[in-house]
């Protein structure tokens, strides 16, 4: 029974070390993409239309920066709760991105139908001449 418990602890420790290693490797990219998102949000806020949606890339950038900071903390503190917090930030980032993609696809479909009906109406006007 002792060997089984010891084996589970060793496996758990191995998995946690691997998670820490992967999180450390992705820290730079998380922070880089977070800064890029924040900058793109700030630049889009300079236009009148962009100011309405500028908060989204800024929020997403902040989430990525927070995930990167949590990954760094997880490596240095060896606290598995930091890994959970990092994954939770990434989960929220991907949920928001997924919802945005669904909205964009829905708007594209509506736009195609609107353009199609407009184009059909214009063509029917030309056929009368």
Image (tube, helix red, strand yellow):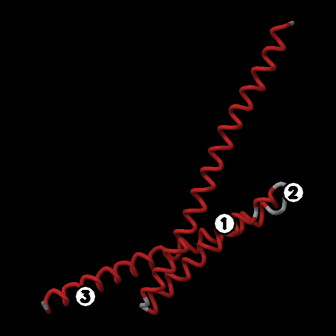
Q: CA distance from mark 2 to mark 1?
A: 19 Å
The x, y position of residue 81, in whole percent, is: 46, 86
Residue indicated by mark 2: 48
Q: Is residue 115 above or below residue 36?
A: above
Q: Kindly report which numbered mark, 3 or 1, lies closer to the viewer in this rendering.
A: 3
- Give me the residue at 14% from left, 92% from top: 2
Q: Which residue was labeled with disc 3?
A: 9
Relative to 35, 77 lies left or right: left
Residue picked out by circle 1: 37
Tell me whether circle 3 and circle 1 mark residues in contact (CB < 8 Å). Answer: no
User: Which element type, helix, strand or loop, lies under badge 2?
Assistant: loop
**Residue plotted at (51% across, 80% down):** 85
Q: Residue at x 48, y 73 (%)?
A: 26
Which mark is nearer the camera, 2 or 3?
A: 3
Q: Quadrant of residue 49?
A: bottom right
Sequence-first disc among 2 and 1: 1
Q: Residue at x 78, y 63 (%)?
A: 43
The number of discs equals 3
Q: Quadrant of the C terminus?
A: top right
Q: Quadrant of residue 30?
A: bottom right
66 over 112 or under it: above or below: below
Within 10 Å of disc 2 (Cα), the crowding (few <14, some 14-19, many 20+) is few
Provide residue 98's location: percent of width, then percent of height.
Answer: 57, 56
Of mark 2 and mark 3, the one earlier in the sequence is 3
| Residue 101 against residue 80 in the figure, above or below | above
User: Which label's residue is closer to the chain start, 3 or 1?
Assistant: 3
Task: Please state the horizontal and vertical placement of residue 65, each as a whole percent of the image.
Answer: 60, 76
């Amino acid at each position: 029974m002792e060997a089984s418990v010891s084996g589970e602890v060793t496996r758990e420790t191995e998995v946690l070390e691997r998670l820490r290693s992967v999180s450390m490797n992705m820290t730079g990219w998380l922070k880089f993409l977070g800064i890029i998102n924040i900058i793109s949000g700030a630049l889009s806020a300079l236009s009148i239309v962009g100011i309405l949606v500028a908060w989204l890339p800024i929020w997403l950038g902040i989430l990525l920066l927070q995930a990167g900071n949590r990954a760094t903390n997880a490596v240095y503190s060896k606290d598995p709760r930091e890994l959970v917090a990092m994954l939770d930030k990434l989960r929220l980032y991907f949920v928001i991105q997924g919802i945005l993609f669904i909205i964009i696809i829905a708007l594209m479909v509506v736009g195609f139908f609107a353009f199609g009906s407009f184009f059909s109406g214009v063509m029917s006007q030309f056929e009368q001449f």
